[in-house]
């Protein structure tokens, strides 16, 4: 079974500073370094992946995006500045996805087909996003977690890759994230992100083996999850009161500990299972209805 590997390409430090520290900073070089490191690991395992790229990263580091495309990975969009759909609404969403698609296409001189919402924020209440994505030329979306979590998830949504029929005869392919019920966890396991970072690799392997009997697994991770370097200078905790500062320092210490495990987990995953891009997985489905014509671009 060929699975899909996806990398949500964002500057973890810049988003952390904006969201957790209340301070906007310029993007850090860490995103470039970490992405190159991931590409080296992929190369060593002869694996291609889909990179869902944030517009602000593409704008500041266009050569990084060119490198991703030159290495035959799939370039896809992750919006411009990582704003969740429920916070921006339909009009801003349209602007955001148009801007990020055009930005990426201008850099790689090829069409971009796929989109992933920041924080998997397409849910039942933002179903309108499908129509806008299809209208703006996206061929597939991969933003749905078909389960219920505190801040995201769409429990009733189909678990397999499917075509979503829309008004006016349009449609879009949805590639939902892989969710597996594991009674030992008392909650559902998602193949990637925090589940991969905080739990032992054996859990990931077990989930992958189980899911592969039914369908391809869609795995995701972020470049910052393998980042072992110290906190960049731009990120400052100086302005925080001592209580909040201690809390953040504790969080950074714990997350740093788990980041140390990610590179070897990724390498084991690439050794134990086979992966390719999302567009390849879609086009490998035997149902012709799934096919996206990629003749004119990547
Ligand atoms: Zn993201």
Image: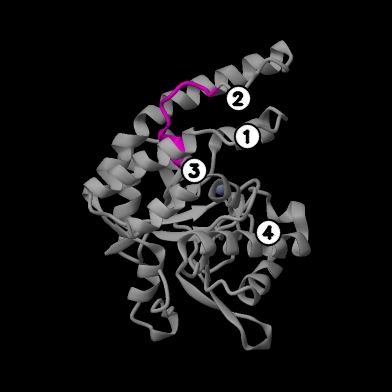
Q: Earlier in the sequence, mark 1 or mark 3?
A: 1
User: What residue do we see at 72% from left, 17% from top?
Assistant: 240
Q: Which mark is residue 163?
A: none
Q: Judge whether 231 appears above or below 109 on screen.
A: above
Q: Residue 120: x percent and y percent? A: 58, 54
Is residue 230 covered in magenta? yes
Residue at mark 2 to residue at mark 4: CA–CA distance: 26 Å
User: What residue do we see at 25% from left, 42% from top?
Assistant: 268
Q: Which residue is mark 3?
A: 186
User: What residue do we see at 49% from left, 43% from top?
Assistant: 186
Q: Which residue is mark 4?
A: 96
Q: Quadrant of residue 165?
A: bottom right
Q: Which residue is mark 2?
A: 234
Mark 1 surroundings within 10 Å by alpha-carbon count, few (fewer than 14), some (14 through 19), many (20 or more): few
Q: Residue 295: x percent and y percent? A: 38, 79
Q: Which residue is mark 1?
A: 26
Q: Earlier in the sequence, mark 1 or mark 2?
A: 1
| Residue 206 appears in the rendering | yes
Mark 2 surroundings within 10 Å by alpha-carbon count, few (fewer than 14), some (14 through 19), many (20 or more): some
Say what secondary structure mark 1 lies in.
Answer: loop
Q: Earlier in the sequence, mark 2 or mark 4?
A: 4
Residue at mark 2 to residue at mark 3: CA–CA distance: 39 Å
Q: Earlier in the sequence, mark 4 or mark 3?
A: 4
Which residues are drawn in magenta? 223-232
Mark 3 surroundings within 10 Å by alpha-carbon count, few (fewer than 14), some (14 through 19), many (20 or more): few
Pointer 1 with pointer 2, Cβ within 8 A: yes
Q: Earlier in the sequence, mark 2 or mark 3?
A: 3
Say what secondary structure mark 4 lies in.
Answer: helix
């Amino acid at each position: 079974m060929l699975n899909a590997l996806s990398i949500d390409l964002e500057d973890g430090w810049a988003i952390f500073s904006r969201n957790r520290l209340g301070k906007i900073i310029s993007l850090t070089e860490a995103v470039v370094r970490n992405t190159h490191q991931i590409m080296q690991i992929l190369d060593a395992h002869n694996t291609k992946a889909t990179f869902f790229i944030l517009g602000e990263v593409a704008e500041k580091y266009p050569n990084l995006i060119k490198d991703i495309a030159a290495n035959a990975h799939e370039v896809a969009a992750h919006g411009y500045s990582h704003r969740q759909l429920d916070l921006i609404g339909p009009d801003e969403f349209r602007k955001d996805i148009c801007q990020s698609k055009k930005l990426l296409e201008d850099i790689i001189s090829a069409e971009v087909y796929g989109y992933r919402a920041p924080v998997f924020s397409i849910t039942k209440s933002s179903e309108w996003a499908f129509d806008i994505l299809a209208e703006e030329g996206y061929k597939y979306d991969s933003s749905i977690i078909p389960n219920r979590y505190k801040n995201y998830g769409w429990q009733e949504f189909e678990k397999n890759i499917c075509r979503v029929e829309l008004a006016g005869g349009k449609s879009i392919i949805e590639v939902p994230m892989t969710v597996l019920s594991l009674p030992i966890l008392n909650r559902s396991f998602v193949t990637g992100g925090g589940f991969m970072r905080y739990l032992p690799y054996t859990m990931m392997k077990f989930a992958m083996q189980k899911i592969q009997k039914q369908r391809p697994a869609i795995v995701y991770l972020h470049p910052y999850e393998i980042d072992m370097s110290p906190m960049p200078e731009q990120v400052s905790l100086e302005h925080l009161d001592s209580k909040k500062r201690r809390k953040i320092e504790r969080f950074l210490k714990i997350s740093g500990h788990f980041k140390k495990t990610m590179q070897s987990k990724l390498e084991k995953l690439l050794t134990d299972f086979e992966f390719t891009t999302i567009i390849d997985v879609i086009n490998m489905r035997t149902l012709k209805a799934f096919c996206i014509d990629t003749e004119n671009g990547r």
